[in-house]
Structures are given as C-alpha cells and as structure tokens.
C-alpha cells in the first residue's frame, strides 16, 4: 500500500539510459584524448626536445628555437581542434 503512495523520482526508459551511457563514454574518450595531448606536449616542450632546436641558425632572420616552439604550439591547437570536433 505504501508503494503506491510514493511517486518515483526518476522515470527513465531503457533508450534514455542507453543514450546517456553512450554520451558519458564519448565524454570519457574526449577527456582521455585531452590528457594524452597534454602529456605529449609537455614532453615535446621539455628540454631534450627543445635543445635539438637550440642552434645558432636563423630562418628568415628568426631563431630556430622560436620556430620550433611556434610549430609545436600550432600542432597543439590543430590537434585540440580535431579532438574537439570528434
């Protein structure tokens, strides 16, 4: 008798539950991709990699180190844009 007096708080169908579960899995994959990108670029902008660009070479009167950092930065923005659209 008491069961009929209490209204259920959540009324969700199986289809709604499945859709919510799929959305959470997609969000989890996006978070994992962002973590991987963060680790990748923290390694790319670390000393051993940047020391390879630290030469006394000028390209169009710009030091090679600055060009390397700029290219890594552009690569990061491009990969973040690609991972954002998936």
Image (tube, grey):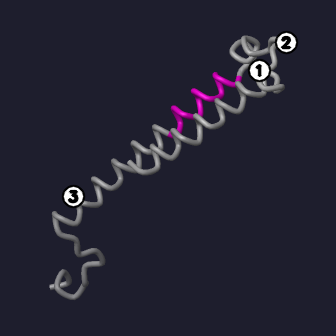
Q: Which of marks 1 and 3 is nearer the N terminus?
A: 3
Q: Is mark 2 on a helix, strand or loop?
A: loop
Q: Is residue 83 above or below residue 22?
A: above
Q: Is residue 65 above or below residue 31?
A: above
Identify the residue shown where x is 24% and y is 60%.
19
Q: Is residue 14 left or right of residue 86?
A: left
- Which residue was labeled with disc 3? 18
Alpha carbon distance from label 1 to label 3: 51 Å
Instruction: Find disc 2 in the rendering and name its residue.
Output: 56
Q: Start and end of the magenta stretch? A: 34-45
Secondary structure under badge 3? helix
Q: Is residue 77 left or right of residue 45?
A: left
SS class of the residue under badge 1?
A: helix
Q: Residue 13 — which label?
A: none
Q: Rounded to the nearest whole Å, what is the CA distance between mark 3 and mark 2?
A: 58 Å
The x, y position of residue 75, in whole percent, is 58, 34
Residue 47 quadrant: top right
- Residue 37: percent from the left, percent from the top? 54, 34
Q: Which one is earlier in the sequence, the residue at label 1 or at label 2?
A: 2
Q: Quick check: marks 1 and 3 in contact, CB under 8 Å?
A: no
Q: Dot 1, how many residues are within 10 Å of its Cα: few (below 14), some (14-19), or many (20+)?
A: some
In this orientation, which residue lies closer to the viewer: 6 or 42? 42
Mark 1 in CB contact with mark 2 (< 8 angstroms)? no
Residue at the far front: name it.
60
Mark positioned earlier in the residue sequence (3 or 2): 3
> Residue 64, labelled with which disc?
1
Q: Residues within 10 Å of mark 2 (few under 14, many from 20)?
A: few
Which residue sits at x=35%, y=53%?
A: 24
Count of marks, rendered view? 3
| Residue lying farthest to the bottom in this orientation | 5
């Amino acid at each position: 008798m008491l069961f009929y007096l209490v209204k259920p708080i959540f009324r969700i169908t199986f289809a709604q539950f499945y859709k919510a579960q799929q959305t959470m899995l997609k969000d989890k994959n996006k978070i994992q991709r962002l973590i991987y990108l963060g680790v990748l670029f923290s390694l790319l902008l670390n000393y051993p990699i940047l020391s390879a660009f630290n030469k006394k070479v000028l390209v169009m009167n710009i030091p090679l180190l600055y060009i390397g950092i700029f290219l890594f930065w552009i690569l990061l923005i491009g990969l973040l844009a690609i991972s954002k659209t998936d």
